[in-house]
Image (cartoon, helix red, strand yellow):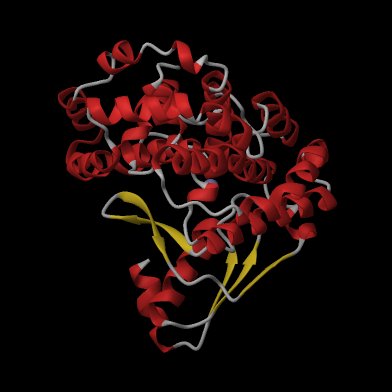
Amino acid sequence: AKEVAQMGASVDFFVAIGAGTLCDLAKYAGDKHRKPVLLYATAASMNGYTSAIVALKIRGLKRTMPCAPAIGVFADPEVIATAPQRMTAAGVGDFLSKASSSADWRASNILRDEYYCPRPREFSDDIQTRIIETAPRVGYADPEAIGVVLEGLLLTGLGMVIAGSSAPASGGEHLISHYLDMKHALYGTPNDLHGAQVGVGTVYALRLWEKVLELDPQALDVDALIARQPTDEQVRIWVEDDWGPVAPEVLAQWREKALDAEGLRAELGRFRDRYWQMRELLSQDLLSSDVAAKAIKQAGGPVRPEELDAPIDECRKAELFARFLRNRFTILDLAAEVGVT
Ligand SMILES: [Zn+2]
């Protein structure tokens, strides 16, 4: 990234022709030199083309950083139809993640008073139905169906720009993918395409949401739930075991959202009191995990951790420990708090 940015000092604008990595490099360089960026997308594999963030590897860690969005994004479904099938299937996974991520975001507003904006969800609602309907044709690389996926990805990228945050398109399911990417960056553990990992994470997160919203909030045994939360010491040992040299940075993220016993008691109280309101509001975001899994499968993508090109024990650990990676509250936190696995 540094090299590209240096090379770009003397140009008037940047053009990238490619998928996520190349386009992110151009956005990064353009942002550094305050020059316009044009992108020509060659795969419908993720929603970053229109977003105002870039994912870059910095000192071995994958991070997302804010940047100016591209001034133009171009794509031709006929060209994208020639990209590997797994890439478009990954795009379907990345798109559908908004069902769980927008629920996570809204829940963080209901339970923790975090900033929330309903606009991103509103304008990509109808495209979700169309993507689910056309998923089988994505599996046959039909350019028209691929155009629908592309449109959905470009819209969710814009949703992040409108929200001024990646929250509408990045919740617990993305943390599962980040966990696998960080293991890859630090230890060379095999990982899969972003959208493939996110799709598997989405099916998992939506299942957790289904279990959490089936609970009887009045029947929660608050004392027992508080007693079963991991101690600071346990979390520190897990994080150090997982992340070695970067454990302090991970722990700093975790501590920003970690609750002590009293904080957790208050949150469980809010969960009980606002449960019905939450159920009703989140029904606008959530999608059935079976429907999401079916669509990703029809598009030709993985839906179970066993189907990813990543070690299954790392995937299982990601489900349990990915929540420690970031200060953002997600279903991975809520499920752990209310004792749902
Ligand atoms: Zn994504």
User: The C terminus appears in which quarter of the rendering?
Assistant: top left
Residue closer to the observer: 288 or 131: 288
Q: Quadrant of residue 3?
A: bottom left
Residue closer to the observer: 217 or 340: 217
Tell me what residue is drawn at x 80 percent, y 58 percent: 78
The tally of labels here is 0
Task: Look at the picture and state if 303 lies above or below 101.
Answer: above
Image location of residue 89, percent across then percent down: 67, 40
Looking at this view, name the residue that lies furthest to the front. 273
Task: Look at the picture and state if 15 lies above or below 304.
Answer: below
Tell me what residue is drawn at x 46 percent, y 27 percent: 273
Q: Quadrant of residue 236?
A: top left
Residue 12 visible in this rendered orientation of the protein: yes
User: The N terminus appears in which quarter of the rendering?
Assistant: bottom left
Residue 116 lies left or right of residue 82; in this view the side is: left
Image location of residue 296, percent across then percent down: 68, 34
Residue 134 lies left or right of residue 270; in this view the side is: right
Residue 311 visible in this rendered orientation of the protein: no
Residue closer to the observer: 160 or 12: 160
Tell me what residue is drawn at x 43 percent, y 24 percent: 335
Tell me what residue is drawn at x 59 percent, y 76 percent: 71
Image location of residue 158, percent across then percent down: 60, 61
Task: Look at the picture and state if 22 lies above or below 71.
Answer: above
Task: Look at the picture and state if 120 lies above or below 320.
Answer: below
